[in-house]
Amino acid sequence: MFKYSEVESIFVIPEVKSVTTYKSVSGKKGTSPVIAVVLMVAVAVAISVTVYAWSSGFISKKSTQEAVSAESLILESIQLSGTNLVLHIRSHDPSAVYLDAVYVEGELRASKMGYRLGGDSVTPVDLTSLVNSKGGDGNFQDGDRVMLVTTRGTQIQFVVKD
């Protein structure tokens, strides 16, 4: 079978020579931790300033576009006769403006009206007939707080006075 010397040679572990150590390249030291932190903070601040400048420019452009699309409407007169209300609304918008909803005291009286106000003109609006035709309560009283809303979201708010 096996001799003792043969078995011994199977389990022989090679000797480990010395571990190789590396010296720094040309004698330079690494960046100090303080300088590394200062550089990271400077980069973070630069990125933050860039994002802020971009987003504030984006927001101002968007608000300018919204201001351009706003409708210019003026309530010229309010005539209350009994419970019938007739308005005269001047539109300074060159294109047609459409009334979409009527609220009285915060309560919706009529919606999806689609009533056209002519561009650059004064349009009489029989609000009582208009609300009644949409199935709402077209009766108005002195002191009612009324809000008209256009299809683009422009609001006209007023109080009915006799």
Image (cartoon, helix red, strand yellow):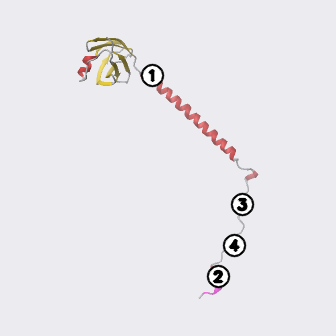
Q: Secondary structure at mark 1?
A: helix
Q: Residue drawn 57% across and 34% down?
A: 50
Left or right: where 72 falls relative to 33:
left
Q: Secondary structure at mark 2?
A: helix
Tags 3 and 1 touching, CB below 8 Å: no
Which picture quadrant has residue 81? Answer: top left
Q: Which residue was labeled with disc 2?
A: 8
Is 26 in front, or is 124? 124
First in residue order: circle 2 vs circle 4: 2
Magenta region, residue range: 2-9
Q: Seen in the image, is 103 located left or right of residue 31?
A: left
Q: Position of residue 105 (x, y in %)?
A: 33, 22
Q: Amino acid at mark 1?
A: Ala
Which percent across, then down, holds residue 77? 34, 11
Residue 44 vs residue 24: left or right? left
Q: Badge 1: how crowded within 10 Å, few (<14), some, or many (20+)? A: few
How many angstroms separate mark 2 from mark 3 (CA)? Answer: 33 Å
Give the SS element for disc 4: loop
Vertical placement of 60 versus 123: above or below?
A: below
| Residue 15 numbered tag | 4
Q: Mark 3 or mark 4, which has the lower sequence index?
A: 4
Residue 58 showing in the rendered view: yes
Residue identifier under label 1: 67
> Looking at the rendering, in which quadrant would you find the N terminus?
bottom right
